[in-house]
Image (spheres, grey):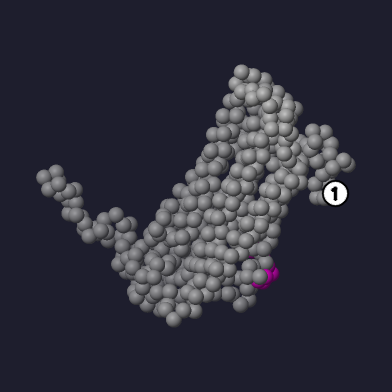
Amino acid sequence: MDTTVATTGTEGQKWGGASKPLNVSYGKMMMWFFILSDALTFTGFLAAYGFSRFKFIEEWPIADEVFNHFPFLHGTDAPMFYVALMTFILIGSSVTMVLAVDAGHHMNKKKVSLYMLLTIIGGFIFVGSQAWEWKNFINGEYGAVKTKGGKILQFLDVETGKRVALNEFVKVGPRDVETYGNSEGIWYTTSGEYNATYTIEEVKKGFVDNPNVTIRTQQLIVNEETGASEKLVLSREDALIKLNKDAVGVVEGANLTENEYGAPLFADFFFFITGFHGFHVFSGVIFNLIIFFNVLLGTYERRGSYEMVEKVGLYWHFVDLVWVFVFTFFYLV
Amino acid sequence: MADHAAHDGHKLAIFRGTLKFKSNTQKIWGVLIFLSLITIVEVALGYIKPDFLNGKIIGLKLLNWIFIILTLVKAYYITWDFMHMRDETSGLRRSVVWTSVFLIIYLMVILLVEGEYIYQVYKNAAVSFDF
């Protein structure tokens, strides 16, 4: 391995790296300062998220309603349980990582490779879970109506106060599609409703026909008894007026411009911040894989030091650290 | 340094020396249990949302303050024990931690105050924003 190291004739002297500032190697120190700068990047994103949330405090979605799915428990309201599980997976993979670092200090190649492998598996499970969360969020659950001012109106059962999905009270009418062929050069013409599951007119009609459905607006009111903030539920009469006067479109699920749960900005920040974090997890898994193969090849055994494992370990823990904050600010607060 | 620095140069005591571990591996599992407990408490509080925690302190609900403080506690133990910040020199520790803590508090306070102000403008303006 000596052949790959250039000699400069300053070895053993101060400028040849004889003394370590802060008693830490160059690589580890730089990893720390990279982490510092990356932490500030995430701070910028989360601070922007906080700014927008305070600005649109009323129409901000209630996290418990958005993320309430759990695999194999269809229709069960399980708020946060899945993200909590994801948190445990990531903390668990952090633990196997730090165990790998510890095994590296004891020059135990077998244990290092085992723990690295477990860390990589945990990372993959986490990225997969995030994809599943995205899928649920993008598909949505109940559907809602958008007003002229860009606010969201959601539907509730008058008696139970439970959410009602659009497909429970809206009848789908005919869609006007005129088909053409190759000779005309276009496939079809339509009034634009062809792709929509429901049109706003169909929702309005379904609402009139079903007297047990009412509307929940985004306006926050404080419950006098408990002190909890709740969204304002309109009376049946007010709901009819509101729907006929203001509603302009149907929203199903969430994307970068629309969000059935509330402010579209929430969806933008969710996709961007969890996406950026997921990208970090993914690149962390790749780094871990590279180091894992190096461990298997015995590179660090020959080098006499497993410090590389320590450096990717720092990065991996940082990813865990960011998730702790994302978890709090997206799901808990 | 001298009293709780054991083998490998790892400091093996947490909670300001009240809980001492025999080896680094043991400390890792101990910290995992502690972090899991905090997460369970967070999820339980988020699920139940007790009414007596709805009171507001400095613009935020008491419950939200609890979440933020628990998060910072978790962040501390991840950094100190998983990332071994406990074992680094005070110079490195301060240059990383003080820098980030100062800048994060600075940015957060400014942006949150500004966001709240714009909300008030929207809410109390002559033009309605809810239509």
| Residue B31 at x, y percent in the picture | 74, 44
**Helix, strand or loop at mark 1:** loop
Judge from the rendering whether residue A248 lies leftward or rightward of residue A9; answer left or right. left
Judge from the rendering whether residue B29 lies leftward or rightward of residue B43; answer left or right. right
| Residue A305 at x, y percent in the picture | 70, 26
What's the magenta region? B48-57
Q: Does residue A197 appear in this view? A: yes
Q: Nearer the viewer, residue A159 or B101?
A: B101
Q: Residue furthest bottom?
A: B126
Q: Quadrant of residue A214?
A: bottom left
**Which residue lies at the image location 44% right of the left edge and 60% below the top edge?**
A264
Q: Does residue A103 appear in this view? A: no
Q: Nearer the viewer, residue A61 or A242?
A: A61
**Which residue lies at the image location 59% right of the left edge and 65% below the top edge?**
B110
Q: Residue furthest right?
A: B3
| Residue A285 at x, y percent in the picture | 56, 36
Name the kind of residue labelled 1 in the image: Thr
**Which residue lies at the image location 36% right of the left edge and 70% below the top edge?**
A148
* Residue A306 higher or lower than A193, as above or below: above
Q: Which residue is mark 1?
A: B18
Which of the image's four quarters has the N terminus of chain A? top right
Q: Nearer the viewer, residue B68 or B2?
A: B2
